[in-house]
Amino acid sequence: MSNQVTVSDIFRRAMEIRKSDPSGSMNEVKSRIVSEFNGKAFPSTAYLTIPEMDNIAPEEDWTAGLPIVLRGIQNEDWNDVALGIIISLEQVENYPKMSGREDDPAKDWRNRQKGIEEANAKNMSKWMPDDLMNLAKRSAKQ
């Protein structure tokens, strides 16, 4: 199974192709993906994700093509797999151009800590040092 490609591997390969020829069309990228992976084992549906994209675009964008990738895997059709990869690639490419990266500090609306940051800091300062001190004392006794 170590030779089996993952959806992330295919996505990274599509990004490499795109980076090597930024003026090329998405159809060219799709064709290259199909030709490079045709005849190889299909990825496992258990790893139907591209987790490294979470900091670049919202999940609803980078996952846009995954249902088509799933259909391609289930039907053993590299054209569908490549099409789904291209849909996700387009979303990941377009999102930062239009909205900035997800991990951009200026994007408070996507900040998962917004609204709870002060309460977290207050609570952490109350109990964390004592807990750590007790842990250290217990470790020293052993």
Image (tube, grey):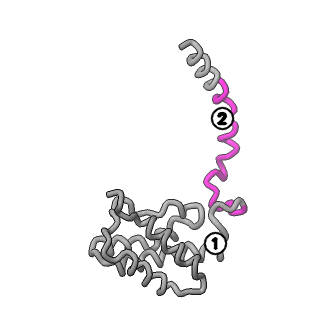
For this orientation, the residue located farthest to the right is: 106
**In the depicted structure, whether residue 104 falls above or below residue 36:** above
Horizontal placement of 66 versus 109: left or right?
Answer: left
Q: Residue at x 33, y 75 (%)?
A: 72
Q: Residue at x 65, y 35 (%)?
A: 123
Q: Residue at x 66, y 50 (%)?
A: 115
Q: Position of residue 93 (x, y in %)?
A: 58, 75
C-alpha gap between disc 2 and disc 1: 34 Å
State the residue in front, 35 or 117.
35
Q: Residue at x 35, y 66 (%)?
A: 43
Judging by the rendered image, the residue that carries numbered circle 2 is: 124
**In the depicted structure, whether residue 15 falls above or below residue 134:** below
Horizontal placement of 69 versus 130: left or right?
Answer: left
**What residue type is disc 2 on?**
Met
Can you say which quadrant of the picture contains the N terminus? bottom left
For this orientation, the residue located farthest to the top is: 141
**Numbered circle sitting on residue 139:** none
Q: Secondary structure at mark 2?
A: helix
Q: Position of residue 8 (x, y in %)?
A: 45, 65
Judging by the rendered image, the residue that carries numbered circle 1 is: 96
Name the magenta segment's main secondary structure: helix
Span shown in magenta: 106-130
